[in-house]
Amino acid sequence: MYRGDSWGCPFCLIYLNYLIMRKLLIINILSFLFLYGPALYAQVTLFDGKGSAYSIVIPSASSPLEVKAANLFQDYFNRITGFQLPVMADDQPVNEYEIVIGRSNRLARYKINIKQGELGQDGFIIRTHRQDLIITGELPEGTLNGVYTFLEEYLGCRFYSPGVMHIPRMDHVILPKIKDRQVPVFTLRELYFPERQDKEYLAWHKLHTRNSEQWGMWVHTFRRLVPATEYFRSTPTYFAEINGRRVPNGQLCLTHPEVFSVLTENLRKNMDKKPRAQYWSVSQNDNFLACQCTGCQEAADRLGGQSGIMIDFINRVAAEFPDKVISTLAYQYTRRAPSKVKPLPNVNIMLCSIECNRSQPIAFDPSSASFVKDVKDWTHLTDNILIWDYVVQFRNYISPFPNMRVLQPNLEFFAKNNCRMMFQQGSGPVWSEFSELRSYLIAKLLWDPYQDADKIMDDFIVGYYRSAAPFIKQYIEFMHDELERSGDDLRIFGNPIDGIGSYLRPDLIWEYEKLFDLAEDAVAEEPETLQRVQAARLPLEFAILDISLQHVDAQLSWFEDSGGNMQARKDMLNRLDAFVLRCNKLGIKMLNEMGTTPEEYRQQIHDYLAEKGSF
């Protein structure tokens, strides 16, 4: 019998099961939404395979850089999807789907309030908010940087080198939830490689150039501000006394009472020609010939060394121009920080690492201990420091130079010591060993030196060398491993023969040759990639040619015994001709900092062989 307080009735049990199942279903739905709902809701579909409902929104009073940022986004989105997004000003009604670029009035809708100085000149925010995408900086430069970063990190575009890019084709563009805020570690990021001549490459990689209006004069300016051609004959005492004689090709006599007035007057004339320039270098010439007169020697004792004389003089110049930044070198004989004088706030110190070994990170290399101390000492005196670092072999731009493993730890060391301005001196406008790879890697690390350098290198090698990538990677790793195993130093003014006991041992050279043979075979049907591989091979070819001049062994030698006479080997002459031909084909006009051309190098070898009676 049915009882009103019982669930024994079959219909009641069915109803009870229904309630239980409904409750479980509701719990499961709520659990699913809790776990996965935010991710699904956070996704932003910019392109669904057929089209896009989005508009690009920019401020109604946009700066030129904000307009460029919007056009850049529109252009690359079209290349990736084939769809053209419209661009509209923020004084138009709000759309349901918007890509907001720049300091638009729309930011208030997303509660984005950028405090002054929060992002600096170059920093930016990339954020999704419901279905919208926002890219903005504190300043227009930051907004443009944000668009470049979005194209690379979220759409997969790459700018490997001028003329070599990767722009993917995408059937759908679906973004995850994004909350990205980036501020560069270094406020000045200059890279001195051939790639700097391409303005779009500089912009994409967020690099600076001293050719901008910011710098009025750049290093070694004593010779320009007090030129010997104008003053030495009439007033030789303006110039350094060396071994009891005044010389026109040394430094200035910084204790001569008239040198200061002459220099500042000529500096003022230069400033009048470039009134917008903020930085002005007043710095020593490129030699060790510091003045030895009695006045300068007494000043060195009183001010704490040669750097003390320099900083005391530069401080006086800086006081004359308080609205400018006076930059000077801490270089060679002035590298050590002074102990008795401190730079004024508007004095910039260019601290140079020219003497350092490049086979180990500066911070851990015993031979670089004095430079590490100098960095720390200078940073105790000022935070206005520009590091001038050297990242190629200057005596032979085109020689193998396995320093890539020190680039990241060195930049990290400078960052940790509060050095915020970086000048990475490569080979200037001249191609050098792996200059495309070095430029790409250093550019990324100048933005954030704490990144994984190996991942950046792998990304470049795969994209740039394509099917040859495994062999190029193995070559690079092999050479670096051998240098590390040897414990040898690596100097920027070295020669290939310096590596004969480590990374350029004769047995290794022929292993490297095999790797490049495999690399060339892998891209034999891809002419453009093959040319990149052949360019990467040139440094090894140069090393073989140059080391063989030392008659290392039967294989690494320019000479062969011909009836008791040592004659030049025809295969080596052919190798030299092929080297020069390939350099010319690739537009390589200089082999070193001194300006030696490939043809001049060939002639030097011919002259050497003729001198030996073998040619």
Image (cartoon, rainbow, N blue to C red):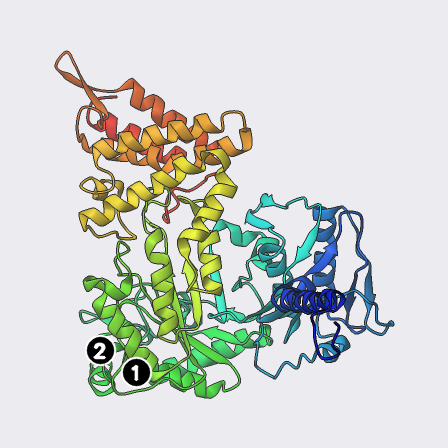
Q: Which mark is residue 255?
A: 1
Quadrant location of the C terminus in the rendered image: top left
Where residue 226 sits: x, y (%)?
Answer: 41, 72
Where residue 109 sits: x, y (%)?
Answer: 75, 78
| Residue 576 position (above or below residue 27) | above
The crowding category of the residue bearing disc 2, from other C-alpha atoms within 10 Å (few below 14, some 14 to 19, many at least 20), is many
Element under disc 2: loop
| Residue 511 position (above or below residue 301) | above
Name the residue located 40 percent from the left edge and 26 percent from the top edge.
Answer: 578
Q: Which mark is residue 293?
A: 2
Front residue of this view, candidates 26 and 490: 26
Q: Earlier in the sequence, mark 1 or mark 2?
A: 1
Q: Quadrant of residue 544?
A: top left
Where residue 468 sits: x, y (%)?
Answer: 45, 34
The answer to whether the residues at label 1 and label 2 have Cβ atoms under 8 Å apart is yes
Cα–Cα span, label 1 and label 2:
9 Å
